[in-house]
Amino acid sequence: MAKGRTFFEKVWDDHVIADLGENTFLLQIDRLFLHEMSGSVAMRQLEASGRRPASPSQVFTVIDHVIDSAPGRGPSDSHLPAGTEMIKAARRGSHEYGFTFFDVGDRRQGIVHVVSPELAIALPGLTLVCGDSHTCTVGGVGALAWGIGSTEGEHVLATQTLAQVKPKTMRINFNGKLPPNVYAKDMILHLIGEIGANGGIGYAVEFAGEAIRDLPVEGRLTICNMAIEFSAKYGFVPPDDVTIDFLKDREFAPKGAAWDEAEAYWRTLPSDLDAVFDREVDIDCSRIRPQVTWGTSPQQVVSIDGRIPDPSGIEDPGTRKLVESALQYVQLTPGSPIKGVRIDTAYIGSCTNARLSDLRIAAAILKGRKVATGIEAICVPGSTSVRAQAEAEGLDTIFREAGFEWHESGCAMCGHMGNDRLLDRRVISTTNRNFEGRQGPRTRTHLASPATVAASALMGVIADVSTIEKG
Amino acid sequence: MESFTSITGTAVPFMRINIDTDQITPGPEILRGRADGYRSSLFARWRYLDMDKRTPDPDFILNREPWKHAAILLADRNFGCGSSRESAPQALRAFGFRSVIAPSFGGIFFSNSFRNGLLPVELPIEDVRHLADQVEASGGKARLTVDLEAQKVTGPDRETYVFRAPSVLREMLLAGVDEIDLTLSRAAEIAAFRNQDQAERPWAYRPRRAGQAH
């Protein structure tokens, strides 16, 4: 009898146009998402080559990366002149080629990986690529999605295919239930701390187990978002009832008979019971506490009760050097507790944690309270429609009354796109990268869940959310 | 695609773990534009005391002789992790690098490198350290050879290290072939696949809303 197949193998097999030998395959690409930074480069290269897009109906564009997020922004505002030109080039190219385009001012505009599942452009079993490493986010709705470079983007534009080396498979089982005040962000940070920032190299990663099944789609998107932070290009949760309920009736979801046909196919995709993975990792969720990073890699993470490590006890010279240089950058003392570290800024935003559920969690903590004196607090909703829904629920009022700035949607303050507001500040952030300079020159970023960020904003120091009574 | 067969040159020991693409080309650098192929953007945060004024940090290894002329970069685990920005391999190439040797690479960077004439070579950490020790001891005089045709690295002591590059990417880099032309030569095969697939998975091809004009 044939051996069972994993979700990944089923989706991969259904997209193989040609076996190019030695584990490389030419794949059908169902969706290409472009944004103004890498997407405008891909469009420019395509134009320079004299080629045309092979399948414009499968291409989508959004403006998100370099557009200013400040309230009242103009349609092409960026912190650098080259940013404005990128926005205009993406706009021009998208109109010329007839791509589905979500411009600034469109209610469907927002961070690409928030928008694509929200509008059901990403669907289970589809291959979806975008010139952004966090494209793996939309594995949270059961798509096979991964980040590509702009040359690969040009290749997809010209051919609607991509040659890829087939990765190995890994399954990560989040077993048991989550304790109170522990969220999807804590699960994924804990995992990266366990397996390391290079633990996923060469793997397509399936997230499984009771805690994943219990998570709403938004939490699954948070988990998959950070697959790239342990260097797995692909991360996903195979479709189930939760996925299918989430997608039904959304703007670009199949309708009527097409939905029924699609759903029947999606039901066949989960990994077979006898499927074999190249590697399996088990995580006991009952032991996970709220997580905060202390260093310059997402793997440099501790529980909220933990302490900053001491490099003198580390044997491997490379790892010791890594810890030493991170400590120098973040200006923290080895052996001291992470809780109580004074912060300058609290930031809620990014493709990791700026969806409606994230804003609701933060608002429940902020309600009727004020951020600590001297603390700068900023909220950037993940999409224009998340922003509108939050306003309809009155969340914006809660954020504003607590002392938060309420921004327009975009990526600009997660990756440093010329805005020096966070220069040399210590930021507790719901983003995905605490790399040196990621949020600005000498900015020291501590990654955490929206709940931990909200609690820390109120206290003015890195704080344990369980010590704050929710409103 | 720029071709690569074999190169011999100076190697610079840069033995850090998790060098991410935000360090190789910081975000604002991408927005500066690529008139010089991002040559001046490479490692901008580490290379300059002041990024705007471009004041070189004399302590940074790539600002010093003879390392500033290196063609090969030796690094520790997970080189090029993080963002998918293609400016990262482009900046390394524009600076003069033809190859990076490390125990492992971020997957997107690895793939982007081939497409920009930069060869990523995976060797065990012990071997990379051994090579780094030799070039360091020689003060940068020792030379390495990276041969893609034979898939081997030859160290200053003539010891050889075998590596494996993905075959399709290897052949394209050896010949300097345009990948899109290569794929388009399979146009009939692609069309046949899409015709059949479209019948089986129509929703994958027609994502527009019902009733929406195309």
Image: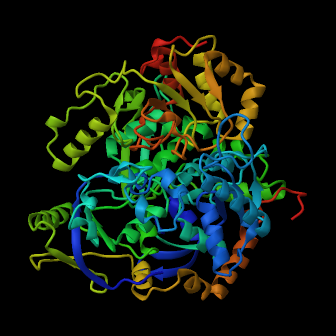
Q: Can see residue B190?
A: yes
Residue A358 image point, x, y percent:
60, 31
Q: Which of the 4 image quadrants contains residue A328? A: top left
Query: B168 left or right of A359?
Result: left
Q: How many marks?
A: 0
Q: Nearer the viewer, residue A169 or A457?
A: A457
Look at 28% across and 29% down and name the residue there: A308
Horizontal and vertical percent position of residue A226:
48, 45
Is B84 situated left or right of A408 in this image? left
In this rendering, the answer to whether B179 lies above or below A240 is below
Colouring style: rainbow
Query: Which residue is more in the foreground, A396 or B144?
Result: B144
Say which residue appears at 33% left-offset and 38% top-offset. A300
Above or below residue A292? Residue B153 is below
Name the spot of residue A447 as percent of width and height, x first.
44, 34
Q: Is residue A167 visible?
A: no
Give the image location of residue A336, x and y in percent: 26, 23
Out of A34 and B23, give the one closest to the viewer.
B23
- Quarter holding the C terminus of chain A is top right
**In the image, residue A245 above or below residue B28:** above
Of A23 and A136, nearer the camera is A136
Please, is residue B128 above or below residue A175 in the view? Answer: below
Kindly identify the residue that appears in the image at 60 percent across and 66 percent down: A41
- Residue at x 66%, y 58% (from the top left corner): A85
